Amino acid sequence: MVLGTLHNKVLKIGTGNKLYTSLEFFEGNRNVNSKNVQRLIGAIKEYNLLSICPLLVYYIDGVYKIADGQHRYLAALELNIPFYIIVVKEPYDITVIGRLNSNHKNWRLGDYAKHWANQKETSKVYGKYLEYYNENKITHGILIALYNKVHIRLHREGGNKYFKNGELIFNNLIRDHVEDRLYKLKQLEGAALNPVLKPSTLKKQQFQGAILTAVNNENFNFKKFLQNLYHSRHRFNELAKTVDMVHEIYRIENIRRRK
């Protein structure tokens, strides 16, 4: 079967190749972000995908310049491992760098969820996760935190890492916890009149995180909070920070209404 005409070759550049440390960057390319380099180093140590993510390189006036992949290049150098390049045959266009950078988009949590839901081994767990997500006004960050049974600020990075790697866990204990918290969040719809909670507020991660922070406090009376919220004025639509929303939640909970 003929797949097509060979156009650009992928070349492996080992540590002994004279190109290994002589590639240059284009002026006008985005600045190197050291945090991105370190993040890539960690990712490559865990699973090296450089062979299927070659650098795009132009040969201009006797110099090989990187149009796309400068962070991967620096990560490979620091790890002292081979990298791969494609020497682009098309004429160089200065606008290509901006186009490449703007067209690249990192996977979001929803992309990982969809991916693992379509894999046989993880379809059941991630399929149920997507069911919860699609049926509730909740962010991926908060839902993952519920699965991990801790507040998002305490387990954000670790929980997301396992989630992205297809290692999400689901059992009866997690199911009960997730469904209880989702029910409480759902009870907030229509729970306030002065003013009505905006849809954007209800789905805001800071608001959901604040509610869950309060609910995780064994001394917090959620039923009393709902009753007071219905009869009292609140500022949730105006607030932006989780900590301010938590204070507002406790203020409303502690309101003493006349009987």
Image (cartoon, helix red, strand yellow):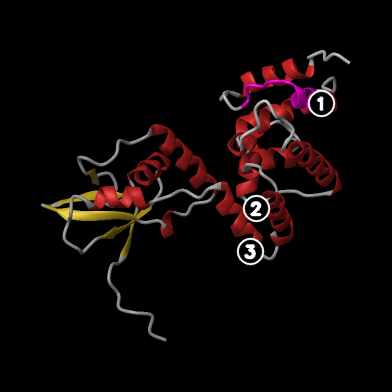
Q: Is residue 207 above or below residue 163?
A: above
Task: Say what amino acid the circle numbered 2 marks.
Answer: Gly
Quick one: label 1 or label 2, which is nearer the N terminus? 2
Task: Say what amino acid the circle numbered 1 marks.
Answer: Gln
The answer to whether residue 152 is visible is: no
Q: Sort mark 3 into few (<14), some (14-19) or many (20+) by Cα contacts within 10 Å.
A: few
Task: Say what amino acid the circle numbered 3 marks.
Answer: Asn
Give the mark toward the camera: 1 or 2: 1
Q: Residue furthest left?
A: 61
Between residue 195 and residue 23, name the one nearer to us.
195
Magenta span has 233?
yes
| Residue tagged 1 | 227
Which residues fall within the magenta stretch? 225-236
Q: Position of residue 220 (x, y in %)?
A: 82, 22
Q: Residue furthest right?
A: 259
Q: Please name the residue shown 70% across and 61% down the image.
A: 123
Image quadrant containing the N terminus: bottom left
Quick one: label 3 or label 1, which is nearer the N terminus? 3
Q: Is residue 54 above or below residue 145?
A: below
Give the mark toward the camera: 2 or 3: 3
The answer for how far apart the CA atoms under marks 2 and 3 are is 11 Å
Between residue 91 and residue 134, name the one nearer to us.
134
Label 3's element?
loop
The answer for how far apart the CA atoms under marks 3 and 1 are is 43 Å
Q: Which mark is residue 166?
A: 2
| Residue tagged 3 | 118
